[in-house]
Image (tube, rainbow, N blue to C red):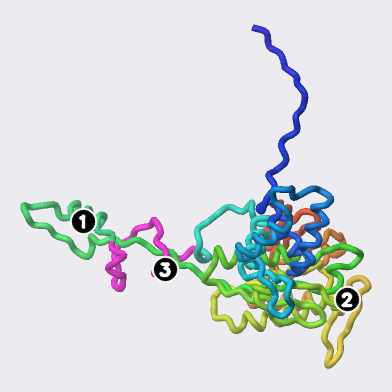
Amino acid sequence: MAVGFRFRDFVPEDQPEKGFESLFKLFMQLVTITSGDVGEALQWLNELDKQYGLTDDNYGMGNFIDDLKKKGYIDENEQEKGEFKITPKTEQGIRKSALEEIFGKLKKSSTGNHRTPHTGQGDEQSTDLREFRFGDSLESIQMTESIRNAQLNHGMEGDNFMLTEGDLEVRENEHKSQTSTVLMIDISHSMILYGEDRITPAKKVAMALAELVKQKYPKDFLDVIVFGNDAWQIEVKDLPYLQVGPYHTNTVAGLELAMDLLRKRKTPNKQIFMITDGKPTCLKEGNGYYKNSFGLDRKVVNKTLNLAAAARRVKIPITTFMITSDPYLQKFVEEFTEVNQGKAYYSGLKGLGHLVFEDYKKNRRKTL
């Protein structure tokens, strides 16, 4: 039997089906870039439609806008007729989209809290059995195993059956711990400096982390703060609307506010997630500011590192998400993370799904 190859003309794959779903994915990306400005996002979508033919005679941009309204993704602004705003449904959809984009490779696990190595009167059963102890609840007694122990220990004589306390077995419960998390987001001017859009990937990381905490650890506490010249608290629902301001980067103010918020939480575990381009440039001094945007200022850097060490002393690890690939800025983040004994993720602007992860406490490095 002859063996060979058959050649034929290459036929490209069909174009993806045009309609709501394909346009909606683009719309969600654009509305993130435009900080929730629906009108600007739709204008960009129209330009892309002209260039790439995203719609056809069967489904046009007007049909898409009507569907956005019908499906509850946009509402007409009551003050400004003809203008639209995104809805809470869209805000959550943007967070979910960011979660899938950035942490889509992470393995799924059950919804709940953070596991600890301890057992006892927790809220989830383990596979381990032990003898009954005074104070154990009746619900935790495993009757099948206990009856089997009674038969083995005392035997069966006629209709008599003996079950003693020593025969009883209970199933261990795993302790679950709550964690309080503060999410810090850099909104300084450097996040859009030199024509680089760093704030959009920063927002995506922030929304992904917020959605991850809400979905996977619903019993945790999550506070969100932004920092420029100063630091202040915002709501999770405000994340899609974040914009860069004419600010320097007061990382110290952000860390101080984060630690103040965590002191008020009574949970045993506390942590900080910081999203930044890595360059602190500002300190608050009295009623004014000490600023230096040229390189890494020794005075600013030292105070920032001192706070990283202070957080380590009170067992608050800091995980830094670095949204740039500048070597000298990465070097600062490495030093900051080493002082805190925390963790760091490094990502360029092109692909947030590609993250380099460093755990200084365990001296481990891997690529996601």
| Labels 1 and 3: the sequence-earlier one | 3
**What residue sits 68% from the left and 55% below the top?**
101
Q: Secondary structure at mark 1?
A: helix
Q: Residues within 10 Å of mark 3 (few under 14, many from 20)?
A: some
Per the image, the residue denoted by label 3 is 122
Q: Is residue 208 visible?
A: no
**What residue sits 86% from the left and 60% below the top?**
327
Q: Secondary structure at mark 3?
A: loop
Per the image, the residue denoted by label 1 is 147
The residue most toward the front is 57
**Labelled disc at residue 352:** none
User: CB of mark 2 within 8 Å of CB of mark 3?
Assistant: no
Image quarter where the N terminus lies is top right
Taking 127 as reference, is 270 above or below it?
Answer: below
Q: Quadrant of residue 263?
A: bottom right
Per the image, the residue denoted by label 2 is 298
Q: Is residue 182 left or right of residue 128?
A: right
Where residue 114 sits in the image (x, y, percent)?
53, 65
Q: Quadrant of residue 161?
A: bottom left
Q: Residues within 10 Å of mark 2 (few under 14, many from 20)?
A: few
Task: Determine the CA span between mark 2 and mark 3.
Answer: 48 Å
Please give the range of residues in magenta: 116-141
The residue most toward the right is 294
The residue most toward the top is 1
Q: Amino acid at mark 1?
A: Ile
